[in-house]
Image (cartoon, rainbow, N blue to C red):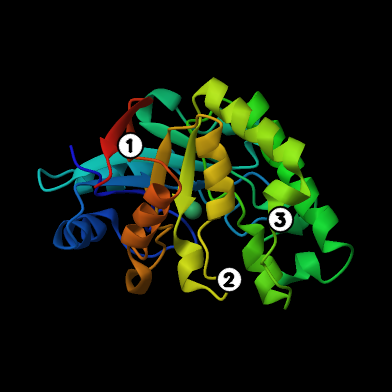
């Protein structure tokens, strides 16, 4: 298998996305993808835009329609703040129906870190540290396959007019090390999310510095995902994301099928 996969693609089953999976498969195949890892938002924070918007039955129906011989369809889920909501989440999804589960941190207490408002009051660096404490709780305590878009707070920071040129491996070295070591020991893969490459912050989540630390600690499980929500940005930045991975000393990126990680060489 080659490495042409996109492991973070939202379908019309997510309230903030609008392209049906069947169209995404056709577009992905035209773009040279071999595998699409679809995800749907499962958010249980009542403040979240996607709260109450998940229906497993509808999502599965949509993916059934998309299943084709042209492209490998993997079934995934993006659970928001799983360290707080996993028990509730398990009442609305059936794990055996998914190839992979990603854990995402969008909210730090009542602040949505993707939004500029999160950074308009209080201390920005303290919020970033709280974000990473939340990530640590996720990787320590929840049964997920992939940690999604770690570092996505840069989106809120950039919108609020802050420089996003900070290095968390220097600001919080022991916290970052603990997160990455926990991921490695628990087999949780690191998603390199390319959506930030088309935004003012012009970076992947995580950044190259964090990826280099992961690689130096012995981490090898990488997935690459575009976080596609709309047609115009479909599959954006994947090749740049893959070259960043190789520049950080990693030689493969992979996929999850039935919860099992399969690496594919990066050329
Ligand atoms: Zn997300
Ligand atoms: Zn997403």
**Residue 84, percent across and down?**
71, 35
In this view, the residue in front, 200 or 230, is 200
- Which residue is tagged 3? 47
Instruction: Describe the element under mark 3 as helix, strand or loop.
Output: loop
Q: Residue 165, percent across and down?
A: 66, 66
First in sequence: mark 2 vs mark 3: 3
Which residue is more in the foreground, 252 or 136? Answer: 252
Label 1 C-beta lies within 8 Å of the nearest ligand 2 atom? no
Residue linked to disc 1:
255
Q: Residue at x 21, y 48 (%)?
A: 66
181 horizontally vs 39: left or right: right
Residue under numbered circle 2: 201
N-terminal label among 3 and 1: 3
Question: Which residue lies most toward the right here?
Answer: 122
Determine whether, in the image, residue 53 is placed left or right of residue 19: right
Q: Nearer the viewer, mark 3 or mark 1?
A: 1
């Amino acid at each position: 298998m080659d490495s042409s996969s996109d492991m973070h693609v939202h379908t019309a089953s997510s309230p903030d996305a609008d392209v049906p999976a069947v169209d995404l498969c056709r577009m992905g195949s035209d773009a040279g993808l071999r595998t699409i890892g679809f995800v749907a938002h499962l958010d249980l924070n009542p403040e979240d835009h996607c709260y109450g918007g998940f229906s497993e039955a509808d999502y599965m129906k949509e993916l059934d329609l998309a299943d084709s011989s042209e492209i490998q369809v993997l079934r995934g889920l993006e659970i928001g703040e799983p360290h707080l909501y996993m028990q509730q989440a398990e009442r609305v999804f059936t794990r055996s129906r998914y190839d992979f589960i990603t854990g995402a941190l969008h909210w730090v207490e009542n602040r949505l870190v993707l939004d500029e408002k999160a950074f308009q009051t209080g201390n920005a660096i303290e919020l970033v540290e709280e974000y990473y404490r939340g990530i640590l709780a996720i990787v320590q305590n929840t049964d997920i396959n992939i940690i999604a878009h770690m570092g996505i707070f840069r989106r809120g920071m950039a919108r609020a007019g802050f420089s996003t040129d900070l290095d968390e491996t220097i600001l919080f070295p022991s916290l970052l090390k603990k997160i990455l070591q926990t991921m490695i020991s628990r087999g949780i893969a690191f998603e390199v999310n390319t959506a930030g490459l088309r935004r003012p912050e012009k970076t992947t989540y995580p950044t190259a510095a964090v990826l280099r630390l992961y690689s130096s600690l012995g981490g090898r499980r990488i997935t690459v995902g575009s976080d596609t929500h709309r047609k115009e940005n479909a599959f954006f930045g994947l090749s740049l994301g893959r070259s960043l991975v190789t520049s950080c000393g990693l030689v493969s990126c992979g996929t999850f099928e039935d919860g099992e990680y399969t690496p594919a060489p990066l050329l």
